[in-house]
Amino acid sequence: MASVGFAVGLGNIWRFPYVTGENGGAAFVMVYLACAFGIGVPILMAELLVGRRGKMAPPGSMTRVARASGHSDLWQWVGKMNLLAAFTIMLVYSVIAGWVLYYLFAAVMTGFSGFDGEMAAQTFDGLLGHPGMMLLWTLAGLMLTGSIIYAGLEAGIERAVTILMPTLFVLMAVLAAYNYVVGGFTEAVEYLFSADFGKIQPPVVLAAIGQAFFSVGVAMAGMMTYGAYMPSSISIPRSVFIIVGADTLVALVAGLVVFPAVFNSGLDPAGGPGLIFKTLPVAFASMPGGHVVSVLFFLLLSVAAITSMVGLVEPQTRWLEENKGFARHKSALVILGVLGALSSLTILGYNRLAGFTLAGRDIAGVLDYFSNQILLPLGGLLLAIFVGWVVPRRVSLEELGMRDGPLFGLWCFLLRFLVPFAIFLVFILGVLVS
């Protein structure tokens, strides 16, 4: 559940349905599923394998497995790259999570009653222009995340996800059922699932590869750390299929939560974050029971944001415990304090420092590019090479609990050849195009 919560983030709620609709509907879903299970599954199995074998934060796990395999400690830098990626992502993600919490509060207080397009745009732009308000809600998100991690593995993370993840699934089911009754559901299904194979061109395939890689949370340190906590009795292959399957299902159902409201109100389904913060409040204002629905929707987003942030912060907390000898409580406070301080730079990039750019990107854009286009693909590529070519075959067999037969041979082939090639494409195109 913690791993599913880590994989299911804000991008699942708006990006995946939008990309699906724009790239051939059901045809894109078929390509994505092939990529998710041909690329996402093999490398996620590899990451959990290293985590469980090493039983430490990513740098320590990489070091232990490399030493046991008779190879250099330099492989620890892959784990450190994963930690840096998670930290960098948090500097942007925590701010966006703050927006979600602000809108949850606004939904509870007003339900966006009387909102039109101009008012929705003014509200969002007003939030971006108010650094103090953004910092307040960013810190609120970090405090919620920190309270879970501060409480520990069993009393904190495990207890939280056993409540939060069922809550997320129930909220999605309730909102999808509501949309089925109220209207716009048929149009959403057609938008998402009508197959247009004519749109399946090389760029669409690359989009599916990228979505499959990023969506499951590979090379962000979280999965390897959760792997370190996995009992040996738990099947890694079975767990990975559940994680990838649940991640995909949530992303698709999210489309049936978001788009019926958009279509029923005659609004534009495009727009990424603007869809959530500018378009949907207008839809909530005009729909029956919009006040309650808006609260449920932003509660759903808040749960997705917090569970993902827990997965990003936990590896850093664990690393401080192992390398600095800090108690968990101190580690959590230090990490959350540093994140809170540095996230203020991201916040200022939307207002006071809006004129500062580097290579044409604002502060959030630079952080996003560095983490998503550089660190994650490189970390994933090196992880695939490490497990596919460096880790002994017997170690992989032991941890995966598989026989040395056709299925294991297929996993080795995918991890050694297809996965590195696909991630390399994502990396090169991300650097050239972005």
Image (cartoon, rainbow, N blue to C red):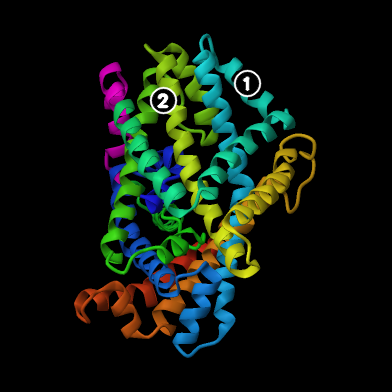
Return the residue at label 2.
296
- Would you place residue 109 above or below residue 385 in this image? above
Q: Position of residue 33 (x, y in %)?
A: 30, 54
| Residue type, numbered disc 2 | Leu
Q: Is residue 184 left or right of residue 378?
A: left
- Would you place residue 425 above or below residue 362 in this image? below
Q: Position of residue 331 (x, y in %)?
A: 62, 56
- Quadrant housing the C terminus: bottom right
Image label count = 2
Q: For the residues marked 2 and 1, what is the alpha-carbon distance in whole angstroms?
A: 20 Å
- Would you place residue 54 above or below residue 203 in this image? below
The span shown in magenta is 176-197
Circle 1 sits in a helix, a strand or a loop, which is it? Answer: helix
Is residue 433 in view? no
Can you tell which quarter of the image residue 206 is in? bottom left
Can you tell which quarter of the image residue 96 is in? top right
Asked whether 23 or 285 is in front, the reply is 285
Front of the two marks 2 and 1: 2
